[in-house]
Image (cartoon, grey):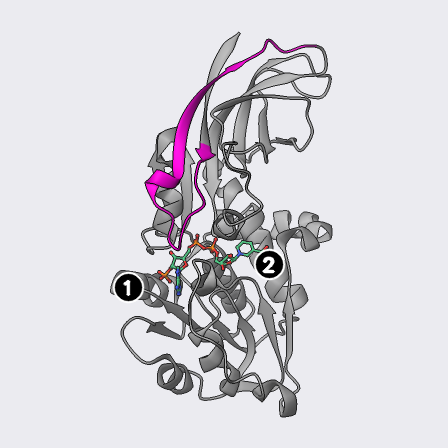
Amino acid sequence: MTTAREIHLVRRPNGLPTSEDFALVDVRLPPIVDGQLLVDAVLLSVDPYMRPRLDSDQPLDAPMLGGGIGRVIESRHPNFATGDLVRHGSGFRDRFVSDGTGLTALRPDPDLPLTVYLHALGGTGLTAYGGLLETGALKDGEQVFVSTAARAVGSVAAQIAKLKGCYVVGTTGSPEKVAWLRDIIGLDAVIDYKMQPLDNAIAAATPNGIDVYFENVGGAHMDAALPRMNVRGRIPVCGMISTYNGGGEGVHNLFNMIYRRVRMEGFVATDFAHLGGSFTREMTKWLKDGSIKYQETVLNGFEKAPEGLIGLFKGQNLGKMLIRIAE
Ligand code: NAP
């Protein structure tokens, strides 16, 4: 018999989640039997998509749905050995028993930090890569606008667009993040959406219009981008974070899609599983040669997971939000 800790949702949030909506719960785990393995969490991924789930899909008084990287500490499963690293979607649990369902072995490149496998080389990177290149059908040298451009998905999308020779405009929410995007990432124009009216700022920053708007925010961002779309423009819709806690501005400018023949299409990361091979090869190269840069906010301690999730909606993270439980 061994023990574990779990983060449970104990109350559905009203708007922005608070720490009282979550509880840290001690549980006992049975000994593993044939076909099972015991996994210790190493890193947890904290993502905006978790917020809408708290309103219905996430069961109450059960571990938060989510995923991360863990290490096998005991195995009676033929496909996993003690010491193996695995990617999992087994929720916010610092130790768990598994029959292998939903686990994939991870063999990280020794020249890259493990954390990149939860962002640039993980689901967020694949989302940016597939959303921009496949759904957005990006062509070299086009005019690109990326919202939330300093964050996990947006920063990768913006940098891939720069690698493809595009003119790239991004929005973000603080002077520090504006400076990172402008001076380190080298975007052509950066807008602090909290400091100026978006419609004027986006119009001024896109003198040749927008061919691809990589949408992460929705609301006022979408409204300001629509009148700037070029004929046959594409809007790959990755997320609409401004709406996840309820409220947010409505969109009034959708009529611009008609005469400009704009295509808007949503997608989820799993749509791009078929791109996994080329994505892993290209992203590994870009990370190693420094063409793709990233930021991370790593909170140490399993119990920090709710704080990490709440922080996403206050803009407290610099890049991907992660929870480290073990080295
Ligand atoms: P993230 O790194 O977790 O960061 C979230 C950031 O969003 C915040 O730090 C804040 O940054 C910004 N934000 C929060 N509330 C906002 C608001 N009301 N208005 C404007 N910006 C706001 O985010 P991420 O993982 O890159 O996710 C970005 C978007 O992609 C989200 O909409 C998410 O749901 C979506 N996504 C979709 C998929 C998919 O499969 N379709 C997969 C992953 C993510 P600043 O204020 O500093 O800009």
- Whether disc 1's CB lies below 8 Å from ligand 1 is answered yes
The residue segment tinted magenta is: 8-33
Residue pointed to by mark 2 = 129
Q: Nearer the viewer, residue 249 or 126?
A: 249
Q: Which of 184 and 12 is in front in this view?
A: 12
Lower position in the chain sequence, tag 2 or tag 1: 2
Identify the residue at horizontal 45%, vertical 45% (top origin): 12
Image quadrant where residue 249 sits: bottom left
Q: Is residue 29 magenta?
A: yes
Q: Dot 2 surroundings within 10 Å: few (below 14), some, or many (20 or more)?
A: many
Identify the residue at horizontal 53%, vertical 41% (top origin): 117
Secondary structure at badge 2 equals: helix
Tell me if I can see residue 303 in this picture: yes
Residue pointed to by mark 1 = 174
Secondary structure at badge 1 equals: loop
Tell me if I can see residue 285 in this picture: no
Identify the residue at horizontal 66%, vertical 71% (top origin): 137
Describe residue 156's horizontal placement relative to residue 266 as left or right: left
Q: Which of 24 and 274 is in front in this view?
A: 24
